[in-house]
Amino acid sequence: MHTPHFLTSLLSGYAAILFTERPIVGLLFLSATFGSPFVGLSGLLCASVALLTTECFQFSNLKNNQAVYNGILLGLSLGVSYTFNMHLFILLLLAGFGVAWITTTFVDFSWRLSHLPVLSLPFVITAFPIHFIAKQYATNGVEHLSLPGDHLFPLEILNTFFTALGATFFSPHPLIGVVIFVGIVWSSRYLAFLAVAGFSVGFIVFTHFAHSPPSSLFSWTAFNCILTSMALGGIFTIPERRSLGMALMGAALAALMMVAMKNILLNLGPLTFVLPFLLSTFFILIGLQKRLSPIPPYLTLEHPQLPEASYKHYRLEKARQTPHPESIALSPPFYGTWHIYQGFYGPHTHQPPWQYALDFFILNGERSFKNQGTELLDYFCFGLPVLSPCSGIVLEAQDHLPDNIPGEANLHNPWGNHILIKLEGGRYVLLAHLKQTSIQVAAGKQIYVGQILAACGNSGRSLQPHLHLQVQTLAALGSATLPFHLSAVASQAEEAHEPYFYPVLCPKKGASIQTIQKNSSIAACFHFPAGRTVRFRFKQPAKDWIERQLKVELTLDGRFRLVSDKGAHCFFEETEHLCLFHNTLGGRDPFLDIFILSLSMTPYAEYVPTWKDHPSALLIPFSFWQRALFMLVRPLDPGLMSQYRRAWNDENKCWHQFGEHRLKIFLNWHVVFYTHVEFYDDPPVMRLSARCGKKSWTLELLAVGQLGDLGIPKWEGEVKN
């Protein structure tokens, strides 16, 4: 193993004890453990052996330095319980080796059992036999910290809080707790808030049920409330109100367990101190996985992150996607602009179990017909083409029923003429009330999105011509319906002044739905295949022009990402109708940030109305102090209220895309950031600019190229601005 990699992994293990992986924070935590030199040395030695063991045997199922932080805890518990001698030294080596094997075993066991994180369970399991062995060969006696007195602050509650934080690393001293708290704040302001909140709740519960003021035992074990609150409210769930409430309940539960296990904790010592945290966290996580439907708080067990990162990802995805996680995507089943006659949970017929359905018709002003509306041909939608909203197999196609006279209904055949389509995933799409003898496909035929299937009619339980669309669970007519949404449409609500483009939409009654026509030239401008390179010149405020480059990479899991020459990157996806950029990763880079903010969500429609998006507020190129102040005031990224519009300039033969990005920082303190993109399809030229107050940034495209590979030639073509 290379020395830099070894040190990075070791320090990340120290950081992982408090749910972060930043090596610099791990270095801070490592230094804190040396308040007692022999205790710190014991933790470092055991962790090093555990890390060497995992690397030597290539335990592929271990991640987030699980064996390392369990080795740290095991070593620290031995160092604080026994005097350092040759017997303890050998035992630390064996303990580090053993905890690595125990960790790799229980990582799989806990995940297969109930998708649980292993946390510090391997430490507890390994500590019991190791400590019993140590009692026979090592000298008992807790080592005292070589630090000033325990009363660092005038308020005793502050001393208790920071002492409890120090006890996380078996160093119960307020000064060490201050160092650890600095590391938590450095990593995550929200985790720091959860630490304080969890401790406060634990203090109240412990004081009430223990019938006595908190003792030294509470100072040693109150970290259970802190860790439980941090784990449940910030690491294994998406941060929001319910997760905060659950985190505080978890802290209270940990405090109750501390009261109930008081004698056990006193008799068995440090090896049991972490049990309240483990039990309360496991119980709550198991319970959350037994819920019948996915409601907040949402679990992040498969990909735990710091709360700021998980919330930023969740907020952006929620803003861009339908609110129901099991919703099925469909395309509009018509050309042009139609209106919603009846939406989900409509008062007429869209009631459970048929609540998820849409009825479409066409309005001109406030009327759906011309003349007196007594004839079918008076209705604007009657006889217009009905398109396939999906790809699938036609299961049923019936069109022999006559269309009703306006105002009358066929109650014996409520669905009227209809087409039932089977989707690949086993769901079924129903198009109903079709025109008599208009169906152009037969049962058993494969159909595709946008294919003309029939014409809009007035058959079945239909008082006026309209098109009924629903997704159902079974093939039988009248089966229960499922949530669905429309993809890539423009819509204008009844109270809105202009239509907006929506990548996904669950429209409501009265909204207009407009289909979007793709512009191939615009799509070509934003097509980024793997290996593509894009070279710009970049101008920042009060700085000279510099050259910068972006390249496109395809990751092992099949995702595309845009990578800057400074290492920052951003995942993106191209669909049939738009290009979507996600949150930036890998550090700050104003060049990449402005590029992403300008093009955050770009539809390929030629005549597209305005659209909205909610990219990260940290894409704004704040100064260091502005960014630090913002992250302190708003630890969870609130996102930007971004509104985009695009227009064609016939004189210059180019597209102009404007963005206005508003950020509410605190009370009436707002920041407004503006972006502007000019792009041509022939020749391919792009110019991006941004401004905020008197500051401005500019990106000008210089060249487009392709990285070389086996069988793929390398090339680069300069662009003439």
Image: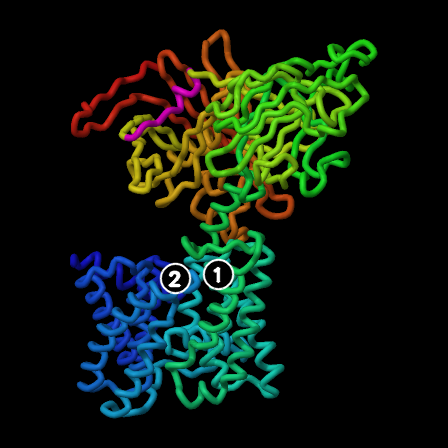
The answer to whether residue 625 is above or below residue 94 is above
- Asked if the stretch drawn in magenta spans residue 435, the answer is no
Residue drawn at x 30%, y 26% as measured from the top left: 535
Q: In the image shown, does 373 or 476 lie closer to the viewer?
A: 476
Total number of numbered labels? Answer: 2
Query: What stretch of residues is rendered in magenta?
Result: 521-530
The answer to whether residue 187 is above or below residue 695 is below
Q: Which residue is mark 1?
A: 191
Which residue is situated farthest in the top direction here? 651
Residue drawn at x 77%, y 23% as measured from the top left: 463
- Give the side of residue 416 with respect to residue 626, left or right: right
Q: Dividing the picture into quarters, in which one does residue 558 lie?
A: top left
Between disc 2 and disc 1, the foreground one is 2
Q: Which amino acid type is shown beneath numbered disc 1? A: Leu
Callout 1 secondary element: helix
Report if residue 384 is visible in the image: yes
Mark 2 neighbour class, 10 Å CA radius: few under 14, some 14 to 19, many 20 or more: some
- Asked if the stretch drawn in magenta spans residue 527, the answer is yes
Residue 595, image x, y percentages: 41, 31
Asked if the residue under mark 1 is in contact with the one under mark 2, i.e. CB atoms within 8 Å, the reply is no
Q: In the image shown, does 529 or 230 lie closer to the viewer?
A: 529
Q: Earlier in the sequence, mark 2 or mark 1?
A: 2
Residue 92, image x, y percentages: 23, 78
Residue 333, image x, y percentages: 58, 23
Q: Which residue is mark 2?
A: 111
